[in-house]
Image (cartoon, rainbow, N blue to C red):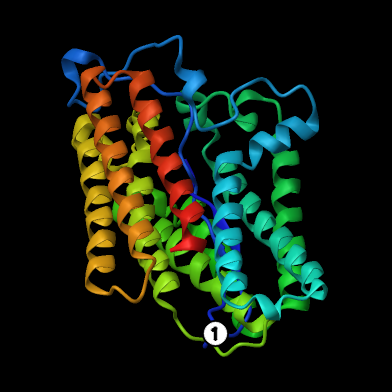
Amino acid sequence: EAVPAVSASVRCDRGAHASSTVALGAGARRGGRLVALSTAAAGDASSFGDDADENSVSVDATGKANSLAGAVWKFVRPHTIRGTILGTTAIVTKCLLNNPELFNVSLIPRAALGLVALLCGNGYIVGINQIYDVDIDKVNKPFLPVAAGELTVPLAWAACATFAALGASIVLTNFGPLISKLYCFGLFLGTIYSIPPFRLKQNPVAAFAIIATVRGFLLNFGVHHATTAALGLPFKWSPPILFITCFVTLFAVVISITKDLADIEGDKKFNIDTFATKLGVKGVSYLGSGLLLANYVAAVAAALVNKGWFNQPLMIGAHVLFSVFLIAKTKALETEGFTKTAVQRYYQNIWYLFYSEYLILPFI
């Protein structure tokens, strides 16, 4: 699946920060029809089966689109849209909570334009991935609109062209050179991830590097930079923003490898190398959980070592709870034998943890 995230930037901290950025992060996010591993072969990437409940726990919109608008909504992959909007909103909110006196209603139209540009970039990146992955998606996630025939390839191209042109024009006319370069760089990374002859999604290391860059660094740095500029503050990293940028970059690596758990059947058929096709569902699930647990341990350690940087009770308490949730869900996956529904539910819970990190950001 393609990993997307286009981010309009905003961030500010009371004694430092300035500049405004719409950062585009994208990448294609695999979600879709889960072909499951049989209980007996939980560690083998090729043992998939059927499960009647697979769509009920999908991160994607799996219902049939009854209109063009419904097809386009599925086309932009709503779960990635939510992640991008939540991340941007959290960073802006953090900035405004630290500098409430700098808020002005005149900033709202510009912020709205930045959000539109962000959503356009997001739509372009996940859309271009679906166009070039249509045959693979017919195996892995046949409910996606292009694979399902709900959106024709010409209309998909028209949507992607519109998203890219509108998003780029908004950024170029309303934001500075740095923001524009970051936005276009995000579009570029999203493009070479999916299209031939580059098709970097076929290389697992290049794929997770792109996803981590756009979802981790570009999104958070961009939003931070854009907001501080809009508020007239000098650019400067604050501990919470530096933390979330590093944290989400590693989290994006986890997403980039666990998203492929849903796509092993089609990836193997079309010779797409991923960590999941090489290590199997069981191995990648444990690897993803291990990396994320290490991320939470580092967050707790950062709060303990630097007491004045964070809201220590919240920073420690929340990440301990997230760790317990992660361990419980990984254990549930194991107990259920790595079935199709269990694996899909596990990936859904990874996204819930991702959303939760941004929910606490304004208050840490």
At 73% from the left and 67% from the top, the residue drawn is 111
At 55% from the left and 34% from the top, the residue drawn is 134
Q: Which residue is mark 1?
A: 17
- Count how many numbered circles sit on residues in the image: 1
Figure check: 124 above or below 321: below
The percent coordinates of residue 228 (x first, y second) are 60, 80
Left or right: where 222 falls relative to 159: left
Q: Position of residue 193 (x, y in %)?
A: 47, 54
**Would you call the spot at circle 1 few (<14 residues within 10 Å), some (14-19), or many (20 or more)?**
many
Q: The C terminus appears in which quarter of the rendering?
A: bottom left
State the residue lying farthest toward the bottom. Answer: 234
- Looking at the rendered structure, the secondary structure element under dot 1 is loop
Which residue is more in the foreground, 49 or 100?
100
Q: Quadrant of residue 76?
A: top right
**Residue 5's image quarter?**
bottom right
Q: Residue 265's x, y, as percent? A: 35, 26
Instruction: Judge whether 27 appears above or below 226 on screen.
Output: above
In this picture, residue 219 sits left or right of residue 118:
left
**Image point 67% across, 54% down: which residue?**
119
* Amino acid under disc 1: His
Quadrant housing residue 161: bottom right
Say if 16 sits above or below 312 in the image: below
In this orientation, does residue 272 appear?
A: no
349, 201: nearer the viewer? 349
Which one is nearer the viewer's eye here, 326 or 277? Answer: 326
Q: Position of residue 104 (x, y in %)?
A: 77, 76
Residue at image location 41% in from the left, 44% down from the top = 353
Q: Is residue 279 visible?
A: yes
The answer to whether 31 appears left or right of 101 in the picture is: left
